[in-house]
Image (cartoon, helix red, strand yellow):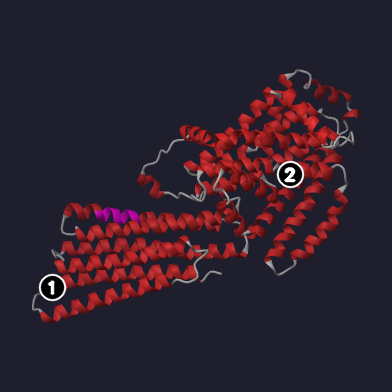
Amino acid sequence: MLQFLTLFGALGMFLYGMNMMSSGLQKAAGAGLRRLLAKLTSSPLKGVLTGVGITSVIQSSSATTVMVVGFVNAGLLTLYQAIGVIMGANIGTTVTAWIVSVFGFKFDISTLAVPIMAIGFILSLSKKAKRRDISEMIIGFALLFLGLAYMKSSVPDLSENPGIFAFIQGWSGHGIWSVLLFLLFGTLLTIVLQSSSATVALTMVMMSMGWIEFPMAAAMVLGENIGTTITANIAAAVGGTQAKRAALAHTVFNVFGVIWAVALFGPFLRLIAWIVSFLGLDGDPAQTPLYQLSMLHTTFNIINTSILIWFIPAIEKIVCSLIHEKEDEDAKEQKLRYIHAGLISTPELAVAEASNEVARFAILMRKGLGHIREAIRGADSEEVFSFEKKKLVRYEEISDNIEMQIVSFLNNLDKSAMSEESVSRTRGMMRIVGELESLGDSGEAIGRILTQKNENGKHFSPTHLESLMEMVDTVDRGFEAMIHNIQNAGSIHDIDNAIKAEVDINAKRDECRRKEYADIESTDDDNYFESLFYLSVVDELERMGDFMINISQAIGARP
């Protein structure tokens, strides 16, 4: 019992070390990793190579796949681009198996784990965030191999338990049924551990200790390729339609590969043995099965990618036919499109998603300005005004709801797993969504002013309507500048466009006031209340300009 508890504890240490190493690498890479993934995907081949490279670096296909699903959800990648990256991620994750088979069994790297941790600890004391991120990666690397060493030492020696050994060996003597049984076991084990790399390492330990032969270990590895797709599907479950499709594409890819690999199981294993022999990796009888298992993992994914890269459009059509768009336009406006709680485990990605959600929030508020325009223009028509007023109230409710959801999402992010730049962006976004919500309040306030005007039997003159339309047009140009700055927050060097828009809005407000005061003094008509309602709408539109310049200033203040 103590051996098994130690085994599970060692497995936990291995998983924790892998997650820690992956987290440190992602933080050290920072925004560069996100930009790389978003840019280097213009063709399927580039997408595959990008997936291979990023997964090889961060040592987690699950992290890459969840990142890709999030990028699709955020609109940074198309589904077509994402499928190629996911294929590459499957190849990149096999690097872990090679590291474990070469260093984890041939050398006792655990003896270096504690000194490596000392280096990591020293770096963690640095005031520079980048060095602290590297320290996290180093300590995670050390824990990974320390966990692997404990796994090897805590696996029971079945030669001392012939009954258990015979029981396990009994699973292996039923041909294709044994292959399917171990394939299912590998799938379930990966679903439980949520890490194909950890399951591959555990499979290697079981094989090195004589629990299972190479063919059954190979079946487990094939099953692990199906089990690893569960992580992305869980992340996408609360995501948008495109996110679900990307996750399903991952499943289709791996299931197809497992089908052909099982159908050609015998010839495939002989091919792996030949490749290992051809490369001269069969010199050490103890290491050869481990190299064969790593080679099988790599070759399987390379062959599968080589076949399916030509059928990405077909895979895209399949997943689109299986997962349909269900929401109408009104329902889409009421809920977040780009950020979802299921993807919060990748904080660096979450910042990119939140940025896109903030940009969408701004675009929604600009649509609200369109309803303000129509409410002013149709204020004297009860039917038109009633419809537009309801829209303004609705947009105010939407703005409150979106602000609350975005702020809640950002508050729940693990700031310790983010770079300093991302933490700063998070603070800036919280300020921005507050100002965007105020734009929704202004829309509702204008609706109330127009309601009071109608209840008092007042009407805007053609001159008033013309001036108000000009004021709305000026505010709309402010929206255009603000949205441009939000969408390009990481690359803008100044906010001159927003400053000019704010100056124009203030100048238009002053012009409207000046003309109205002159008209009041030059006429004897009792138009006081009409002027009051007119100037109140002008002032509220100018207030919207203040909120917009605050947003651009928040963007410009970021490092």
Q: Which residue is mark 2?
A: 95
Whether residue 41 is visible here, answered yes or no, is yes
Q: Is residue 189 left or right of residue 161?
A: left
Name the residue rendered at 81%, 41% in the picture. Answer: 101
Whether residue 10 is visible here, answered yes or no, is no
Q: Secondary structure at mark 1?
A: loop
The quadrant holding residue 212 is top right
In this view of the protein, which residue sits in the foreground, 304 or 17?
304
Q: Is residue 266 above or below residue 61?
A: above
Q: Which residue is mark 1?
A: 527
Q: Quadrant of the C terminus?
A: bottom right
Q: Which residues are magenta?
A: 388-395
Q: Is residue 498 magenta?
A: no
Which-is-in-front pick, marks 2 and 1? Answer: 2
Which disc is residue 347 wearing? none
Q: Is residue 545 left or right of residue 250?
A: left
